[in-house]
Image: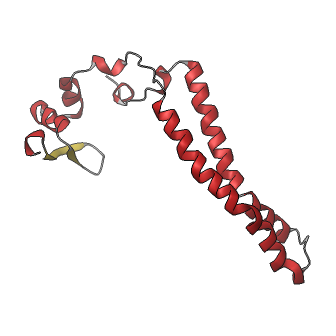
Amino acid sequence: MSIETLIINKRRELPKTKRLIWDIITFLLWVGFIYLWKPLLIVFYGILTLKVPPEEISGWIYDNIHSVTFEHALFMLITTPVVLFILSRLNRHQAPSEHLIYTSRDYSNYFKVDDTHLQACVESQWVTVHHNHHGHIIHLENQITPNDR
């Protein structure tokens, strides 16, 4: 059993069209974020290329930054959470996962952890994983179990 098979990454299990849609939406959200920085980038470009006379620079900076930033920021502040909320409510693809073929015993054998303790940690709400300097698990500590609620 290789380490790659135990790392859960379900993105490749999504249909290509859904992956493409998520990639486009992510790209558009990044474009929107960078668009918010556009006025500041214009000001930096103007300062670095000395396109504005030094005696007019403070007024020019104020005109370029103040005039559009608030409207853009407000638009992105409202639009981004709305888009993300709508996306979170869309029907998700439920592909059969290759990770369902592993049992807790497989994970406990792989990570060298007691199986009953691992099951208790799976059902708890808060788990602390102690590891050595190589990253290997040495102890699992579960603080809040379903019986504690």
1 relative to 48 in the view: left or right: left
Please name whichever residue, 51 or 87, is drawn nearer the observer in this view of the structure: 87
Please name whichever residue, 95 or 68, is drawn nearer the observer in this view of the structure: 68
13 relative to 39 in the view: left or right: left
Residue 89: % across, % down: 46, 31
Quadrant for the N terminus in the image: top left
115 relative to 110 in the view: left or right: left
Residue 61: % across, % down: 79, 73
Please name whichever residue, 40 or 2, is drawn nearer the observer in this view of the structure: 40
The outermost residue toward the bottom is 55
Q: How many marks?
A: 0
Q: Identify which residue is drawn at 91% across, 70% down.
A: 51
Q: Identify which residue is drawn at 61% across, 26% down.
A: 20
Q: Identify which residue is drawn at 69% across, 56% down.
A: 72
Quadrant for the C terminus in the image: top left
The outermost residue toward the left is 147
Quarter of the rendering containing residue 106: top left
Please name whichever residue, 63 or 133, is drawn nearer the observer in this view of the structure: 63
Q: Identify which residue is drawn at 19% across, 30% down.
A: 108
- Residue 113 seen: no
Q: In the rendered image of this protein, does residue 45 appear above or below residue 149?
A: below
Quarter of the rendering containing residue 82: top right
114 relative to 13 in the view: left or right: left
- Residue 12 seen: yes
Residue 34: % across, % down: 68, 52
Which of the colour schemes (rainbow, by chain, secondary structure, one colour) is used?
secondary structure
